[in-house]
Amino acid sequence: MFFKMKWLFNLMVTSLLFFPEKDFYALPKDYGLSEEEVFFTTQDSVKLHGWFFSAPQSKAVLLFFHGNAGNISGRLHKAKGWVERGISVFLVDYRGYGKSEGSIKEGEDLLEDARSALKWLEEKKGASSQEIILYGESVGSYPAIALAREKKFAGLVLEAPFTNVLELARKHYSWVPDFLLKDFLMRNEDAIPQVQAPVFILHGDQDEICPVEFGGRLYELAPSPKEFYVVQGGHHNDLPDVARDHYFEYPFRFISEENHYEN
């Protein structure tokens, strides 16, 4: 009975936190991108899908962990901006999103998927962690920060991150008791002091999902070197439109200076 109740509770929580879509909004060719379609398997035997975009004379590889809604097809414009700047990009769908199989049952599933994506990059592309930039968009900030805590990376970029799920739930689902969230805590503020990468955080000052104060607190806790870009008038899902070229240029410049990439 206990395990059945736990399964039901976690199913309810996942329905509140994650909004996966299987259908693609667009394809890489719609953005002038040429992709390598990738399938790989996690340690717990879940088959995941991603797209790898190789940049000419690539300086590094950006491993992109997206937010809780949609799938990788909704992030193609973000991949294009980095590829144009000489950074290869690996877009990955978590289990249950896009062509990836399975479903998310607890917060650690995100981290398992992220570790498997990193392993693919290291083994199939020969990329060392110090050649990889981790990018965490919203809920993707959790696996990005967790990985950056384990070894040294070229950079960690966080877009509209959160501190922990308890605080996020109290803002949006105050009626949900804390004990139901014990498998989804994702305590970013506990992990970020130990990250081993230059940290760039961008956050809209009008973010209605993850308040900009969340990003500010993570910035204060992060080790140096670090930079915090507050997008004036930016909400949770419109930062590329509001920040325009700065959306790419500011984090790219910061990461390039820290790693001494040539122009």
Image: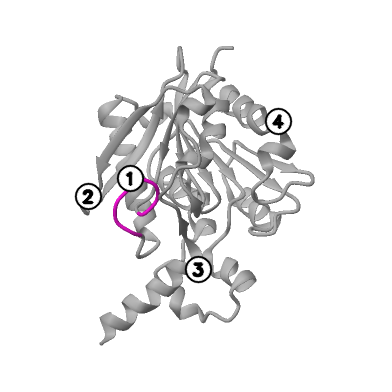
Badge 3 density bin: few <14, some 14–19, many ≥20, Cα 10 Å: few
Name which of mark 1 and mark 4 comes first in the sequence: 1
Kindly identify the amino acid type of the residue bearing the numbered disc 1: Arg
Asked if labels 2 and 1 touch by Cβ distance under 8 angstroms, the answer is yes
Horizontal and vertical percent position of residue 253: 63, 25
Q: Quick check: 212 left or right of 70?
A: right
**Residue closest to the eye, 123 or 5:** 5
The residue under the point 58% across, 27% down is 81
Residue nearest the viewer, comparing 89 with 215: 89
Name the front one of labels 3 and 1.
3
Gap in angstroms between the C-alphas marked 3 and 4: 32 Å
* First-in-chain label (3 vs 1): 3
Residue tagged by mark 3?
Answer: 16
Residue 132 sits in which quadrant? top left
Residue 115's disc number: 1
Marker disc for residue 43: 2
Q: Nearer the viewer, mark 3 or mark 4?
A: 3
